[in-house]
Image (tube, helix red, strand yellow):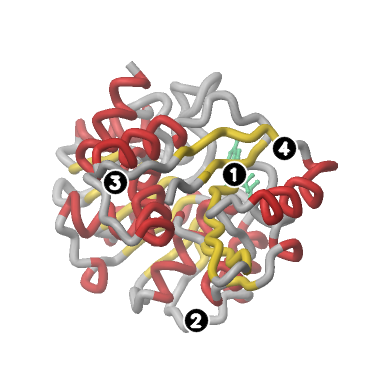
């Protein structure tokens, strides 16, 4: 049966998800469709009800609805509930069930694309916003415990860690403290908006102190390589941008919806071509 899927958000016109999922359906000969739906916050409740009665089989949720959608769904997966954000909704026995595949997508990208053994890493997360929370909670949920967090506002990082229901051995650092101890981490994850347009030359902290065998991830993918990643590369570190996390969060949603495993390399190439 042909199903209808989509993504809701505001704005939504520039979402790369329709292109990525539509191509994945085609390449597996699945007769499904995926559309961008522009839903403003004041219409979120009506939109979810509408999708329910129209038989939409599943959808992604993006800014600004990832948190506000939670009370509008029938069930929430425990990890998504802990994170307090849903990016994937699956129709299961006529119920809408909310999941969060952002942090899991991040993990799978590092495991599959970079062959990283995360349980052996010493991780530093830079930032304490929504993206940092999804990544941190998913990592500790997965059993990775050696994770420190630094943030401009340390109180926010403290709240993020204290509200996490899974155990960790996390230290909260100021940016200055993190800068001085960067050489003690094997994996550094940048989750703030610093490095995006119009602040493309900025980095959240100076990276002069990293070791060459460190892997640095910046979850930004536009620009493709942030100033932080350029600096890390110059120090001999391996680097990856946020494209892997984006592709794999989509692949996890795709698997939940269709039961099929999409070709992630093809998905990535489609998105790279579009980004130019
Ligand atoms: P997202 O959901 O995309 O993670 P967010 O919740 O707004 O976005 O979080 C943004 C993150 O970027 C936070 O860690 C924020 O630091 P604060 O908690 O101190 O606000 C960080 N951030 C944004 N602009 C920053 C800046 N100019 N300098 C340092 N950190 C910044």
Disc 1 marks which residue? 62
Q: Is mark 2 within 8 Å of ligand 1?
A: no
Residue at the spot 48% in from the left edge and 38% down from the top edge: 34
Q: Secondary structure at mark 3?
A: strand
Q: Earlier in the sequence, mark 4 or mark 2?
A: 4
CA distance separating discs 2 and 3: 24 Å
Q: CA distance from mark 1 to mark 4?
A: 10 Å
Which tag, 1 or 2, sits closer to the chain's start? 1
Q: What is the CA distance from the residue labelled 4 to the residue labelled 3?
A: 35 Å
Q: Earlier in the sequence, mark 2 or mark 3?
A: 2
Whether tag 1 and tag 2 are in contact, CB under 8 A, the answer is no
**Circle 2: is it few (<14), some (14-19), or many (20+) Cα within 10 Å?**
some
Q: Is residue 227 above or below residue 51?
A: above
Q: Mark 1 or 3 closer to N-term?
A: 1
- Mark 4 or 2, which is nearer the eye? 4
| Residue 140 in picture, x, y percent from top left | 41, 74
**Foreground label between 2 and 3:** 2
Q: Which residue is mark 3?
A: 216
Splitting the image into four quadrants, where does ligand 1 fall?
top right
Disc 4 vs disc 3: Cβ atoms closer than 8 Å?
no
Is disc 4 surrounded by few (<14), some (14 to 19) or many (20+) residues within 10 Å?
many
Q: Which residue is mark 4?
A: 39
Task: Give 103 or 127, whichever is nearer the viewer.
Answer: 103
Mark 2, secondary structure of its residue: loop
Q: Residue 153: x, y in percent?
A: 64, 53
Q: Position of residue 208 (x, y in %)?
A: 29, 39
Q: Residue furthest front?
A: 1
Query: Is residue 180 at least partly visible in the picture?
Result: no
Give the residue at mark 2: 166
What distance separates the C-alpha of mark 1 from that of mark 2? 25 Å
């Amino acid at each position: 049966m042909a199903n209808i899927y989509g993504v809701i958000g505001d704005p939504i016109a520039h979402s790369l998800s329709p292109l990525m999922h539509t191509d994945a359906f085609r390449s597996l000969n699945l007769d499904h469709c995926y559309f961008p739906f522009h839903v403003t916050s004041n219409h979120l409740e009506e939109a979810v009800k509408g999708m329910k009665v129209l038989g939409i089989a599943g959808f992604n949720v993006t800014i600004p609805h990832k948190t506000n959608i939670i009370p509008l769904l029938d069930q929430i997966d425990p990890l998504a509930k802990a994170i307090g954000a849903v990016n994937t909704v699956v129709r299961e026995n006529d119920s809408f069930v909310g999941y969060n595949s952002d942090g899991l997508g991040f993990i799978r990208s590092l495991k599959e694309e970079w062959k990283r053994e995360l349980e052996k890493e010493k991780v530093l997360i830079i930032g304490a916003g929504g993206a940092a929370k999804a990544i941190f909670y998913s990592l500790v949920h997965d059993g990775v415990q050696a994770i420190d967090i630094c943030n401009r506002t340390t109180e926010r990082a403290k709240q993020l860690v204290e509200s996490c229901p899974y155990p960790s051995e996390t230290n909260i650092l100021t940016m200055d403290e993190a800068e001085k101890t960067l050489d003690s981490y094997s994996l550094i994850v940048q989750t703030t908006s610093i490095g995006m347009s119009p602040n493309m030359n900025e980095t959240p902290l100076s990276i002069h102190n990293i070791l060459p065998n460190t892997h640095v991830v910046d979850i930004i993918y536009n620009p493709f390589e942030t100033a932080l990643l350029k600096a890390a590369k110059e120090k001999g570190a391996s680097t990856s941008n946020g494209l892997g996390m984006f592709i794999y969060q989509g692949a996890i949603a795709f698997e939940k919806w269709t039961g099929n495993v999409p070709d992630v390399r093809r998905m990535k190439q489609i998105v790279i071509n579009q980004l130019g």
